[in-house]
Image (cartoon, rainbow, N blue to C red):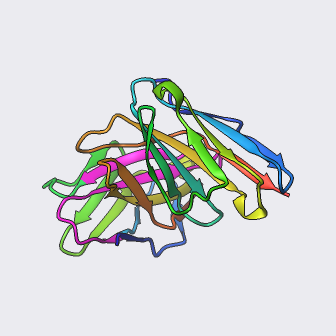
């Protein structure tokens, strides 16, 4: 069974500083995908970044990068130059194949990030 | 892309009433998912459509829940005889599939059952 663990219920970061949000996962599959989503108080889940298990390089998208350590089964999100608008819940998720070929997303419990001015 | 839209954004109902939510996916996306998110948790998978066919249903989807996607465009999720335990955020996501499938979510419908 798939499992995602986010051990930080809440994190604080000073504006313009970098912050790392932790995510570990557990799977017996060789092929899998890992995602990070941002959920502001409005409720919408906003896709941030994706890392495939066979990708050799860490994914980057603007100020977001994913520190992928396959042997340790960790996929930490790094946000550089934090902005006030980054304050939100952040969810790590793993793609879980369904029998019909589609993919369920299995989410962790999230980390609430607060950016301090 | 105009994004995934959901209506209504909020719904308050009394226990025992029926409610229906609508999701309009990104136009070229053939896959549509419904998730439920309770307080303090990440979203949990409910059901999946490939075009108009409902191909997967979670055990979370009791017989009081029904979902449709007529003509493979918008989708509706109906809850009959609502219970207080149904109070949650209901999220819809769509994708075009592929090896690195990315699901794009709507703003959700927040349901409160009194």
Residue B108 or residue B21, whichever sits in front:
B21
Looking at the picture, how far across and down is residue B70, in whole percent? 53, 28
Q: Residue at x 58, y 55 (%)?
A: B36
Q: Bounds of the magenta span?
A: A24-51
Please indicate, yes or no, whether residue A73 appears anywhere in the rendered image. yes
The answer, for residue A87, to whether it is visible in the render is no
Horizontal placement of A89 versus B49: left or right? right
Q: Residue furthest front?
A: B63
Q: Is residue B96 left or right of residue B63?
A: left
Q: Is residue B84 above or below residue A5?
A: above
Residue B41 location in percent, x, y?
A: 57, 65
Please tell me whether residue A38 belongs to the stretch shown in magenta: yes
Residue A39: image x %, image y %?
55, 51
> Count of labels shown?
0
Residue at horizontal 63 percent and vertical 51 percent from the top = B65
Residue A1 rendering spot, x and y as whole percentages: 34, 72
Q: Is residue A50 left or right of residue B65?
A: left
């Amino acid at each position: 069974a798939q499992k995602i663990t986010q051990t930080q219920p809440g994190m604080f970061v000073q504006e313009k500083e970098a912050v790392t949000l932790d995510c570990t996962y557990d799977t017996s599959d060789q092929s899998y995908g890992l995602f990070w989503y941002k959920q502001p108080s409005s409720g919408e889940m906003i896709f941030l970044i994706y890392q495939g298990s066979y990708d050799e390089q860490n994914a980057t998208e603007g100020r977001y990068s994913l520190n992928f350590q396959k042997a340790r089964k960790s996929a930490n999100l790094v946000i550089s130059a934090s902005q006030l608008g980054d304050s939100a819940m952040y969810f790590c998720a793993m793609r879980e194949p369904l029998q019909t070929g589609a993919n369920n997303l299995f989410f962790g419990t999230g980390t609430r990030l607060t950016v301090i001015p | 892309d105009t994004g995934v839209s959901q209506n209504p954004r909020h719904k308050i109902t009394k226990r025992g009433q029926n409610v229906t939510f609508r999701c309009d996916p990104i136009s070229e996306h053939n896959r549509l998912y419904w998730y439920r998110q309770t307080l303090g948790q990440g979203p949990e998978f409910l059901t999946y459509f490939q075009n108009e066919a409902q191909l997967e249903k979670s055990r979370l989807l009791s017989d009081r829940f029904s979902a449709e996607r007529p003509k493979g465009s918008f989708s509706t999720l109906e809850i009959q005889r609502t219970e207080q335990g149904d109070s949650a955020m209901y999220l819809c996501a769509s994708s075009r599939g592929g090896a690195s499938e990315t699901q794009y979510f709507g703003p959700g419908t927040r349901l409160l059952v009194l």
